[in-house]
Image (tube, rainbow, N blue to C red):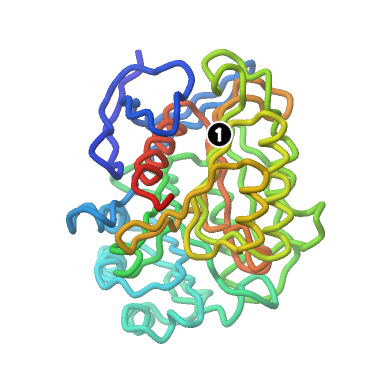
Amino acid sequence: MISWLGVALAGPALLLGPTYPGFGTLDDRRPVPAPVERAVERADLAPDTGGRVAFNDPTGSRGQQYALVRRLDETIRSARPGATVRLAAYSFAMPSTARALLLAHERGAHVQVVVDDHSSHWGAVRRLRGALGEDTSAPSFVQSCRLSCRGGRGNQHAKYLTVSASGRGDDLVMLGSMNLTHYSAQRQWNDLYWVTDPAVHAQFVEMFTSMAQDRPQRRLVLSETRSGFQTDVSPSSEVAGDDPLRERLRQVRCTGAAPGTGIDGRTVVRIAMHAWNGLRGIALALQVAELRRAGCDIAVLYGTGMGRVVANTLRRGGVPVRDSLHDGRRVHHKVMLLSGRYGGQRDVDFVWTGSHNWSDRSLRNDEVILRVAGRPVVEAYLANFRRIWALAAR
């Protein structure tokens, strides 16, 4: 028997409830089940990776705005003595998170932090650097990457936390779109996904270890785990064939979705993207518009970085598009969800989330995309999408 667990989602409409066939319309407010914290291996069916997800609500109370920061801080504070806590952050200025890391270090955890160069001048990082040092061969340290940690251009833009042993589980990985700033909590919609999975934890540790070297390296290619996760890491080549996003869109099939996925046999795609621009962004927009013409049910929410040509390409292709602007707040997600046909399967429910915007720059940055799977987590992201869509500028 499955036990449905609660989850902190933006918007009051989320309730526990049964699974509904199909997705309904964008404005459908029916309750959806919360994600289940479990991992299931199924050789003959679409994967269900389990895990949990939460969203902040920048239009809500202070507690709702800082819900993801609080979740991250509590997880750090739960680290066991002797555990290793690894944090990769962009725009790190949050005093509470710095305090949580220092307390974990004082209790005997090894604390390792990699940040972008501009964060290295801010008080939170300076305080950590003073306590942990900068020797990356030591058990605890702070590394500031001048450009991207693993490349010669761009920035360190990845946003994730790993904890090897904690009161919330071992081999824990958390990632999403949020920056550790007050602006991110108060003015942006963000997501945070977490799971306890040894294989995913090992991949993120491998990525972190290579980032901490702060020198150009070959592209890191990570295999799909047996539990169904797929991790894509930048920097990567700007050749189209090496672009994980373009390859992802090529795998989408718009009709013939199995019952219980999609809408009336059509594959559902929802994209919430902070930045979508540049020549790469235009190429991706052309692919999305083509999927719309092929019969996919697609809708797009965008943040501050939507290029005009990208927006016009989508609209000319018949894709419903909304600026997420509401009361000065905008989407900061880098999310795509899909239900229906993908590759050789007709019954998949996938979410791709992480730090990777649909832009030229993201191929040069340190970025991470994690593909997670399962109906509950897709429905949780869909509920968040509907909430923002209903508030968004038309």
Q: Which residue is mark 1?
A: 350
- 63 shown above or below 213: above
Corner quadrant of residue 185: bottom left
The amino acid beneath tag 1 is Phe
Which x, y percent locates residue 216?
A: 71, 74
Which x, y percent locates residue 41?
A: 55, 23
Horizontal side of 89 relative to 10 (left or right) equals right
**Residue beneath the point at 47% across and 26% down:** 375
- 264 shown above or below 244: above
**Residue beneath the point at 46% across and 24% down:** 23
Which x, y percent locates residue 190?
A: 39, 54
In the foreground, 359 or 104: 359
**Residue beneath the point at 46% across and 70% down:** 90
Horizontal side of 381 relative to 11 (left or right) equals right
Can residue 353 be seen from the camera position used here?
Answer: no
- 195 shown above or below 240: above
Can residue 380 be seen from the camera position used here?
Answer: yes
Which x, y percent locates residue 383?
A: 38, 35
